Image (spheres, rainbow, N blue to C red):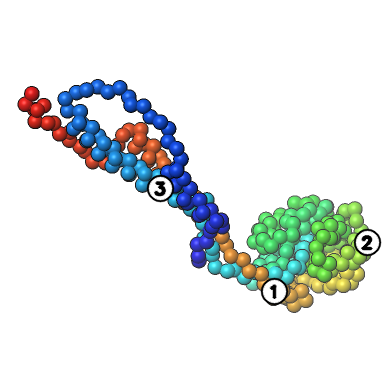
Amino acid sequence: MTIEFAWPWLFAALPLPLLALWLPRAASTTPATLRFPFFNALQASLQNDSGQRSRLRLSLAVLVWLLLVLAAARPQLIGRTVHLPVSGRSLMLAVDISGSMQAEDMQINGRQLSRLTAVKLVAGEFIKKRKGDRLGLILFGDQAYLQAPLTFDRSTVRTLLDEAQIGLAGQQTAIGDAIGLAIKRLRKEPARNRILILLTDGTNTAGNVDPLKAADLAASEGVRIYTIGIGSGSMQVQTPFGLRQVMTGDLDEASLKAIASKTHGRYFRARDTAQLTKIYALLDRIEPVSKDEQTWRPVDELYFWPLGAALLLTMLIALSAAYGWRVTPRVIPVSAEVRHG
């Protein structure tokens, strides 16, 4: 770490107070005086005491000026160089939070999880690894909502995904609207790096946009879509007659495959968290992060320290002038003629 000055040329102002030595002084008149016997001794004592206080105030004033110029030059603490991988890739996650995502047919370490919980766990790790990518998050149910715009702040995107709740956007599934919203947010990004990862466990049952027409529009805009079908398709439930296997969900795999095919992406099927983890690992290989790096150095401003010190010293000078603080106590000598009358 080093200390540097943003405006070092302001140090040229240091000698400005010396100009006061060449400025003309106002003429003074001799005030009326009162004569008393030991005037000379009193005058000498006051001049000596006043001179010490004046020299102290002058020293403080000089120090205040130095601190003010130092603050004006903007001292900064420059940290160590930080390397940031930058790919320029713009990656949007569209996650289904409709009512069917609460089905507990996913497993991890022998524990039953809801589909959305499994997505949060696995997608969260995927987000964590996407250094250098701009990430965004869309949540969709009856309608699609932009939860996080494209950003390098991966931790915020992950937090917003963790806070997503079933039914927050409605109980149905608007896949076409989710794709349309993603296209709108990716349209201004570099053409080669527009990517949408869409996770759903159902079929399009809501929204104003047909998913296949949205896929055609995505293809024309250069957006690659990777679709992931979530859910095992069946789950065990406890009944009075024991455990029974029941079918869950109504996944429209044909549409998801067509969406991926139209946009030069791929379709994946995730029946458990292990498969979902492998899918994200595969996506890392298909869309690897860039090895390019940008560097930056953190900068902390320090000007407020000398500025605060100058303010305190100025207050000290003002108080000494107001209350006439003495540097050392003085005893006024009295001449022998006065002592003896």
Residue 289 located left or right of residue 326: right
Say which amino acid is labelled 2. Answer: Lys
Q: Position of residue 190 (x, y in %)?
A: 81, 66
Q: Secondary structure at mark 2?
A: helix
Say which amino acid is labelled 1. Answer: Asp
The answer to whether residue 176 is seen in the rendering is: yes
Say which amino acid is labelled 3. Answer: Val
Q: Quadrant of residue 107?
A: bottom right
Foreground tag (1 vs 3)? 3
Q: Secondary structure at mark 3?
A: helix
Residue 213 is tagged as 2
In primary-sequence order, the first of circles 2 and 1 is 2
| Observer-nearest of 30 and 59 | 30
Q: Marks 2 and 1: CB-CB under 8 Å?
A: no
Residue 303 located left or right of residue 286: left
Residue at 44% of width from left, 51% of height from top? 66
Q: Secondary structure at mark 1?
A: loop
From mark 2 to mark 3, how far is it between C-alphas? 75 Å
Q: Residues within 10 Å of mark 3 (few under 14, many from 20)?
A: some
Q: Position of residue 196 (x, y in %)?
A: 80, 65
The answer to whether residue 257 is seen in the rendering is: no
Residue at 79% of width from left, 56% of height from top? 140
Q: Which residue is mark 3?
A: 62
Q: Position of residue 118 (x, y in %)?
A: 70, 65
Q: Which residue is mark 1?
A: 292
- Compared with 164, 315 (above or below) is above
